[in-house]
């Protein structure tokens, strides 16, 4: 169910959504599918298996080996390669390349029949992004063209040509492939990989169609701040939406309950509106990123999909820049990646490239996870998230903001705030900046805006209305200083909410500057800001800060110590001991609270990982939330915490990220930690039992007022605390 329908169904409109509202949800909530049979297949499968064939698999791999494995792990959905760059069935379409190893067999058909016999639902995969010489010879206009006018060879396999995603290959040839697959196998849907193209294509069709749409020539390079490139990006989304509609309608003509599922779409709001289920291709981490990045992707999609089925594709192979697809991840890395997705509302789908398996070490890890999820399936059919904190992410800002020195690495603002909330064990969800209406926001008490710089007047009014209704806001840096097109405003769009005005300057980088923590300036409102910092006189300042002028009276718990030299050593001393320039603006606005940070403290935290920055940001969030948390988790280590409601239960997911490899995988091992979990339940609710689902234990617990306190002796990778409710 989409979130707007979910909220309407529960009757929670016209006033701030409270914790009691969350617990009062209907016992069963199912999407309002329009065709008989849709609900069962769309919302049915909980554990998916993807087998991505390679051309030589026919005759070389053992399909029964895979069918037996699917049965072992209780997989109830299969995603299997069908056609596109290679057909794994006896296609009759000219130029649709049949696997050279298949002969007269039907490789796909055998596996489809075997999966159906096991009761699995079938999604078939196509890949239209590359093709062979015979297609080039017959239709050279179907091939993508580079900026210098050259037909584009495939970057990984120069024997292949890259197709134009926005031209006749996808709009004329692939609909015939889709129809043949649908008529032959009657799958539940078709999932298309790499369907959306790669960079700007300069073929004759793209030139003609883009000029007709915009009156402009194609942009010569990818520059998101260039007006022509922005127009191309707008046209591309429109063209891909047309392609989505074309493929989906053709598929439904053959089987009304089936769907086309694109592998990614450049607009998450449109994805949430148009998709009845979605596969998130977030296969594994690469480079210097934490495993919670999988949960972050899930949260972003959840913000627009609501409670529609979201399937998370994860790789058992390596996903670094140079890919080694026939090698495997460590067991610990696989388990923590899947745990992050599941805890944030995704259903797992492993993907294995090639049916002729070389390295089987991953198979037990996946089996262990899937078997645990199968055993506890009813506790994974979530009906609502109980998070009270929403973090706004802005595709608008990502696309239309930047260019100045202090605007580089703008994504670090969101990552920094995300990591603070994970470290603080605060359950939270993501909020898309295009969905700031009351029906989307009423379940939250606090909105966090980590440098959401580009906001329209209407969006600013929506945020103001949220606070007027009793909500709270934490905002940083240049939030609302630009309109929806990225054009600078003379003042913050949220100046009235912040209580400060833009003083026409951004300062930085601030070298050797500090924040003075004024313990003598504490009052009942600001004492919480100093939690954990009681013995700390000063901490590192942010790297950049917006110069602002207060328009009202504020407390002064955090003030500026200006930059002073850091060399030579003889000159390293403050020229000004302290100032009255505030670096944190706190306000009570009706029943809500507003905290504005003029510095880029969230981005600075991500780049420096300063303990003091993390503590201060956590304190600000807790001050603004101003209510008892749904769940409190105490104990050592780093733990990602999410809280969900089901029809007759609620669950607290604990993902143990305590590991020296947390910021750069793969995990070598899993390091268990213990935890104490306090869960607030509403008055009148009876907790009939508590379970630890993944370890299979019935833990000790006690009731204290409206709280249940559960002792969790060990969390290895993923533990789920389940409370049965009546």
Image: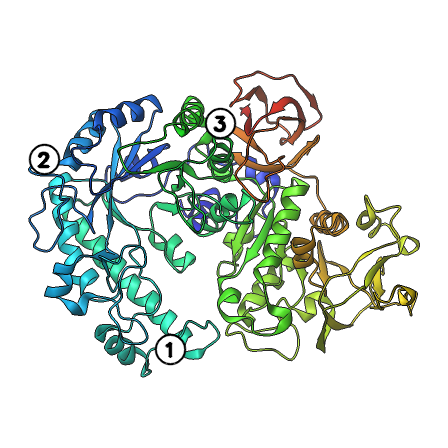
Q: Is residue 179 left or right of residue 21?
A: left
Of 216 and 141, nearer the camera is 141
Q: Secondary structure at mark 1?
A: loop
Q: Which mark is residue 32?
A: none
Give the residue at mark 2: 105
Mark 2 packing: few (<14 Cα in 10 Å), some, or many (20+)? some
Residue at x-position 59% and y-position 23% = 686
Q: Earlier in the sequence, mark 3 or mark 1?
A: 1
- Alpha carbon separation for disc pair 1 and 2: 47 Å
- Alpha carbon separation for disc pair 3 and 2: 49 Å
Q: Report the mark closest to the observer, 3 or 1.
A: 1
Quarter of the N terminus within the rendering: top left
Indicate the position of residue 332 as horizontal and vertical percent values: 51, 31
Give the residue at mark 3: 648
Labelled pair 3, 1 in contact (Cβ < 8 Å): no
Q: Secondary structure at mark 3?
A: loop
Q: Earlier in the sequence, mark 3 or mark 2?
A: 2
Hey, which quadrant is residue 74 in on the image?
Answer: top left
Indicate the position of residue 437 as horizontal and vertical percent values: 51, 58
């Amino acid at each position: 169910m989409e979130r707007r329908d979910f909220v309407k169904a529960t009757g929670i409109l016209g006033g701030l959504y409270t914790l009691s509202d969350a617990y009062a949800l209907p016992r069963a909530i199912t999407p309002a599918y329009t065709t008989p049979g849709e609900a069962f297949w769309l919302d049915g499968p909980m554990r998916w298996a993807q087998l991505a064939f390679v051309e030589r698999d026919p005759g070389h791999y053992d399909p029964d080996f895979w069918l037996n494995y699917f049965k072992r792990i209780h997989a109830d959905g299969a995603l299997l390669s069908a056609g596109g760059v290679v057909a794994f069935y006896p296609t009759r379409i000219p130029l649709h390349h049949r696997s050279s190893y298949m002969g007269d067999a039907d490789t796909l058909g055998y596996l489809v029949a075997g999966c159906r016999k096991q009761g699995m639902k079938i999604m078939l995969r196509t890949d239209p992004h590359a093709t062979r010489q015979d297609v080039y010879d017959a239709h050279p206009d179907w091939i993508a063209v580079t900026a210098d006018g050259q037909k584009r060879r495939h970057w990984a396999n120069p024997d292949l040509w890259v197709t134009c995603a926005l031209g006749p290959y996808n709009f004329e040839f692939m609909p015939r492939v889709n129809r043949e697959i649908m008529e032959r196998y009657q799958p539940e849907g078709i999932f298309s990989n790499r369907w959306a193209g790669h960079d700007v294509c300069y073929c004759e069709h793209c030139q003609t169609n883009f000029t007709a749409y915009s009156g402009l020539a194609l942009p010569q390079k990818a520059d998101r701040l260039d007006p022509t490139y922005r127009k191309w990006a707008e046209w591309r989304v429109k063209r891909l939406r047309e392609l989505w509609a074309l493929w989906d309608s053709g598929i439904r003509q053959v089987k009304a309950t089936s769907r086309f599922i694109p592998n990614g779409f450049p607009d998450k709001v449109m994805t949430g509106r148009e998709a009845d289920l979605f596969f998130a291709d977030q296969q594994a981490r690469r480079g210097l990123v934490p495993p919670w990045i999988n949960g972050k992707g899930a949260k972003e999609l959840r913000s627009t999909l609501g409670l529609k089925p979201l399937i998370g594709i994860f790789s058992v192979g390596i996903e670094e820049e140079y890919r080694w697809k026939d090698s495997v991840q460590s067991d610990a890395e696989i388990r923590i990646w899947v745990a992050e997705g599941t805890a944030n509302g995704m259903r797992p789908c492993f993907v294995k490239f090639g049916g002729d398996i070389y390295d089987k070490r991953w198979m037990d890890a996946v089996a262990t996870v899937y078997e645990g999820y199968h055993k506890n399936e009813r506790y994974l059919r979530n009906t609502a998230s109980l998070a009270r904190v929403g973090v706004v992410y802005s595709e608008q800002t990502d696309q239309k903001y930047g260019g100045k020195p202090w605007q580089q690495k703008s994504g670090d603002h969101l990552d920094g705030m995300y990591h603070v909330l994970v470290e603080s064990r605060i359950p939270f969800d993501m909020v898309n900046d295009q969905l700031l209406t009351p029906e989307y926001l009423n379940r939250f008490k606090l909105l966090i805006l980590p440098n959401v710089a580009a906001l329209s007047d209407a969006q600013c009014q929506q945020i103001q209305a949220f606070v007027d209704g009793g909500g709270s806001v934490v905002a940083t840096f240049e939030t609302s200083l630009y309109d929806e097109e990225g054009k600078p405003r003379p003042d913050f769009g949220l100046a009235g909410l912040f209580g400060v005005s833009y003083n026409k300057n951004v300062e930085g980088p601030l070298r050797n500057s500090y924040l003075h923590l004024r313990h003598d300036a504490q009052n009942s409102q600001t004492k919480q800001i100093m939690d954990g910092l009681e013995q700390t006189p000063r901490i590192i300042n942010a790297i950049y800060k917006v110069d602002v002028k207060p328009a009202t009276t504020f407390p002064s718990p955090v003030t500026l110590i200006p930059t002073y030299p850091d060399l030579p050593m003889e000159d390293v001393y403050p020229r000004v001991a302290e100032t009255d320039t505030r670096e944190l603006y706190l306000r009570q606005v009706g029943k809500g609270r507003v905290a504005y940070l003029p510095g880029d403290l969230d981005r600075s935290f991500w780049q420096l990982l300063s303990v003091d920055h993390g503590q201060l940001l956590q304190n600000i969030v807790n001050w603004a939330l101003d209510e008892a948390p749904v769940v409190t988790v105490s104990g050592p280590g780093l733990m990602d915490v999410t809280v969900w409601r089901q029809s007759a239960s609620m669950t607290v997911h604990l993902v143990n990220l305590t590991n020296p490899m947390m910021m750069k995988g793969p995990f070598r091992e899993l390091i268990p930690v213990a935890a104490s979990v306090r869960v607030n339940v509403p008055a009148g609710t009876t907790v009939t039992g508590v379970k630890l689902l993944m370890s299979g234990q019935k833990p000790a617990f006690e009731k204290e007022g409206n709280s249940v306190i559960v002792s969790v002796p060990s969390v290895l990778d993923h533990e789920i605390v389940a409370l049965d409710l009546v």
